[in-house]
Image (cartoon, rainbow, N blue to C red):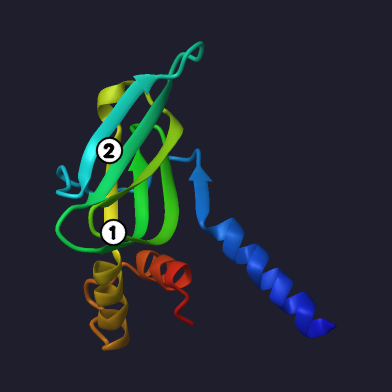
Amino acid sequence: MIKLLGILLMALLVMAGTFVHTDAAPAPYEKQADSKYVKEKIVKPYPGKSGWWIYILKVCADTHNIGITEVILSSDVETMYLGVNKSIPKNDCSTYGAVMKAKNGNTLGYKITTSSEAVEKIVASKQGKRDSINWPEVNRYKFILGYY
């Protein structure tokens, strides 16, 4: 019974942790230049709500399969972390997006982390390369990918 309760609690934590929304000041990160995987970016005002924007990214795997660990959507007001952990097969696409607060639609940006990039950072953290490690980022990747 206790084992079952523990498993259910763990599953609930995993589901709750895959989508984190913060209204606080956005975490500083460099906005990624247009990724070769992003084929379409839609930014339009949310109807009837001033200061709210619909932000959608269409991510495609044209030449090979890609694994997406995390998509970070940001604006000048907020940052949203989408823990994805999804594989996109070659010649297929996946869509990620949100309705976000922003003073201006031009401030909306994204950062896509592939599975290989996330694993490289996790391995570097385990090899003792502690000088340039962003521990909150590495811990997010470990949680999303299921490394314990």
Query: How far from the left and from the top, in percent, is residue 131?
Result: 22, 76
Residue 127 occupies quadrant: bottom left
Query: How far from the left and from the top, in percent, is residue 30?
Result: 22, 48
Quadrant including the N terminus: bottom right
Q: Is residue 72 left or right of residue 13?
A: left
Specify the farthest residue to the top: 48
Q: Is residue 83 left or right of residue 39?
A: right
Residue 80, placed above or below residue 98: below
Residue 88 occupies quadrant: bottom left
Residue 30, placed above or below residue 64: above
Q: Amino acid at mark 1?
A: Thr
Front residue of this view, candidates 74 and 57: 57
Front residue of this view, candidates 40 and 17: 40
Q: Is residue 29 visible?
A: no
Q: Is residue 18 visible?
A: yes
Q: Check residue 109 in the rendering and tell me which mark sits there, or answer none.
A: 2
Residue 137, placed above or below residue 42: below
Q: Residue at x 77, y 79 (%)?
A: 4
Q: Amino acid at mark 2?
A: Gly
Q: Residue at x 44, y 31 (%)?
A: 100
Q: Dot 2: within a 10 Å radius of its alpha carbon, few (fewer than 14), some, or many (20 or more) residues?
A: some
